[in-house]
Amino acid sequence: MLKSQKIHTRSGRIFGQIMGINVISTHLNELLVGVEKNISDSSEFGGRSSKFSILTPNSELVLMAQKDKKLADALNSADFPVPDTVGLNYASKYLFGRSLNIIPGRKLFLELIDLADKNNWRVFLLGGLGDEAKTASAKLQITYPKLQIQFFKGPKFDNNAVPVEKFGRKLEGEAIERINKFSPQLLFVALGNPKQEIWIHKNLSKLKIGGAMAVGGTFRYIAGLSAIPPRWMEKAGLEWLWRLINEPRRIGRVINAVVVFPIRVFFYKIFG
C-alpha cells in the first residue's frame, strides 16, 4: 500500500498516493488487458461509462500538482495513473517501503499502437509541436500499413488548457469535431504538461472515444525529431540525463525532477 486509503481502478488494481497524487503499480501486460477490456466492453462510444483516461504522473507533475488544483484534480481523475519515471519509485520506497512498477509513457504508447493495429482500432493523434503529429502518423503507417489513424495539431493552450490564439476556440472546437466524427478507440494528446492532463479532464465527457492518453513529447520521438535514450540509461533511471544532454533548455525541469522533488519528498515524510 502506498497510503492508508485504497482506491481501485476499473481494472481492479489497487493504487495509492504520493504527495496526494494517485499512482498505480501494475505490469504492462495487465495494463494492456485492462485497456482492451474497457474498450471491448463498450459497443458504443459517447457515454461516460465507456471512456477511460491514462495519465502518466512523474516527479515534475507531482511537484506542479502541489500548487495547481486543476492539475491535481486531473491527475486524480485518471482511470490508469501510470507512474512514468524512476523518481516516483524512489519516492515510494522512501515513503512507504514499497516499489512501484514504472512504465515509460513512450513505451506504453507503442504497445497501445500495436494493440490498436491487432484489434483494428481507430487512433487519433492530437497536438504536438509543428508537424510532429503529421510526421509521427506517417511513420506509424509505415510500420502499421493497415492502422486507421488521423491527426490534428489544434490550437496553442495556456496552462489551464484554455486556447490562447485569436481563433483558438474555433480550432479547439474543430479538434473535438474531428475526433468525434472519427470516433477513435484511442486518442493520444500531446499538448505538454499540465495542459494535456487538464484538457483531457475537461473534455473527456464531450468526446466519442474509447479512451484518452496524455503522451507529452512522444510524437517527437516517433517522428524521429528527438533521440531515444540508450536502453542502459533508461534501465539505470538516467533518462533525465540523456534529455539534458540532448535538450539543454530542459535544465529547469530536470532540476525540479532530480533535486527539488527528492527534497520535497524528504520533508513530506517528516511533516506529512
Image: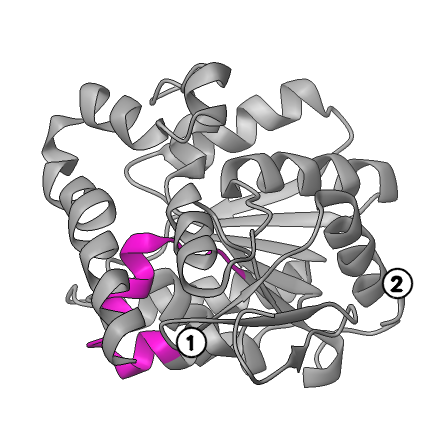
**Location of residue 141 (image quadrant):** top right
Nearest the eye: 89 or 63: 89
Residue 207 falls left or right of residue 258: right
Identify the residue at image location x=54%, y=69%: 2
Residue 196 falls left or right of residue 63: right
Give amino acid for label 1.
Ala
Q: Is residue 69 magenta?
A: yes
Q: Is residue 120 magenta?
A: no
Q: Which residue carries the number 2 mark?
A: 40
Category of crowding for the residue at label 1, using alpha-carbon neighbours closer than 10 angstroms: few (below 14), some (14–19), many (at least 20): many
Nearest the eye: 34 or 130: 34
Q: Which residue carries the number 1 mark?
A: 74
**Location of residue 20 (image quadrant):** bottom left
In the image, which residues are magenta?
Answer: 55-72
Q: Give the secondary structure at mark 1.
A: helix
Nearest the eye: 272 or 84: 272
Principal secondary structure, stretch drawn in magenta: helix
Q: Give the secondary structure at mark 2.
A: helix
